[in-house]
Amino acid sequence: MPKTSPDRRGLLIILSSPSGAGKSTLAKRLRAWDDTIRFSVSATTRAPRPGEIDGADYHFLAEADFKTQVADGGMLEHAHVFGNFYGSPKAAVQEAIDAGQDVLFDIDWQGAQQIRNSSLADHTLSIFLLPPSITELHRRLQTRAQDSDEVIAKRMQKSWDEISHWDAYDYVLVNDDLDATEAKLKAILTAARLRRTQQPQLTDHVRKLQKEFEETL
Ligand code: ADP
Ligand code: 5GP
């Protein structure tokens, strides 16, 4: 079981980028650094890729089931991406952040926008990754060797649509050197965890300081 920190509230950490810029790689590094960070396992109507595990990589749902969950208010956000529906189930997120655990979302700009406009906006940290160049983005998609040429071409076509929303995020990192980006990401997360709104126990602490102040001075 991951450790919990009831002294603080969990953050919703949103990582977006065009496909291939490095979200999954950096998300894994963040988790290796702090294993209390949870991944939000999205629901999707797309078919599983070879090796993908239902419930771990995604919750693979039929379109009718996905739409029922949306209609029942069970999704924190949802969007249509690359011809399929994707969404973040709400219950798991609420449970984690109430227990003081951060939840990491690998979602597109539409999902990020919906979370920023939700009641959880104050507890959200959004980070956008830019590639150093479009040529390098293409090279990364090719060297990942996960998709056919046709799928890579489709992802490249969509990349500008995603990049054009870069300025709606709290932080934007150019993922050139992987180790340097990882270090920046950790610094951003460390600071965001210290936001006043993430430390509900501060109110009690300040009350104690006030009491002591009044008693001693
Ligand atoms: P995304 O999850 O955004 O689609 P990935 O994390 O799968 O992207 O990264 C795409 C490919 O690029 C992977 O093969 C990954 O190892 C590589 N990669 C990620 N970041 C860098 C980097 N800074 N420099 C070089 N290669 C990188
Ligand atoms: P893929 O099919 O390659 O796993 O993901 C395709 C795109 O869908 C990626 O840009 C990813 O960030 C986005 N995505 C994955 N899950 C969600 C989700 O729950 N909500 C939204 N809005 N986008 C998602």
Image: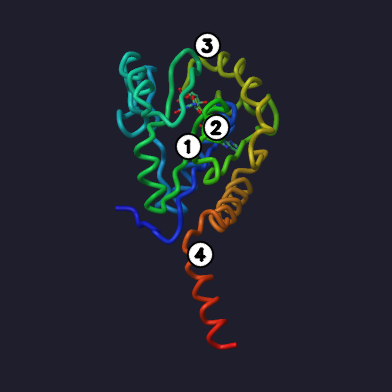
**Of 70 and 55, the residue lying toward us:** 70
Labels 1 and 2 touching (C-beta < 8 A): yes
- Reading the image, the residue beneath label 3 is 150
Instruction: Tell me where residue 78 appears, x and y as whole percent.
Output: 46, 24
For discs 4 and 3, the disc positioned in front in the rendered view? 4
- Reading the image, the residue beneath label 2 is 112
How far apart are labels 3 and 2 at the CA level?
A: 27 Å
Question: Does ligand 2 reach within 8 Å of label 3's beta carbon?
Answer: no
Q: What crowding class fits label 3: few (fewer than 14 Cα within 10 Å), some (14-19), or many (20 or more)?
A: few
For discs 1 and 3, the disc positioned in front in the rendered view? 1
Question: Does ligand 2 reach within 8 Å of label 2's beta carbon?
Answer: yes
Instruction: Classify 85 as above or below 26.
Output: above
State the mark number for residue 203: 4
State the mark number for residue 105: 1
Mark 4 falls on what kind of element? helix
How far apart are labels 4 and 3 at the CA level?
A: 55 Å
How far apart are labels 1 and 2 at the CA level?
A: 9 Å
| Lower sequence index among marks 2 and 4 | 2
Q: Amino acid at mark 2?
A: Ala
Instruction: Tell me where residue 131 appears, x and y as whole percent.
Output: 65, 32
Give the image quarter of residue 112. Answer: top right
**Which residue is located at x 34 percent, y 53 percent?**
2
Mark 2 falls on what kind of element? helix
Q: Amino acid at mark 4?
A: Thr
**Of 8 and 201, the residue lying toward us:** 201
How far apart are labels 1 and 3 at the CA level?
A: 26 Å
Q: What crowding class fits label 4: few (fewer than 14 Cα within 10 Å), some (14-19), or many (20 or more)?
A: few
Q: What crowding class fits label 2: few (fewer than 14 Cα within 10 Å), some (14-19), or many (20 or more)?
A: many
Instruction: Classify 28 as above or below 133.
Output: below
Question: Does ligand 2 reach within 8 Å of label 1's beta carbon?
Answer: yes
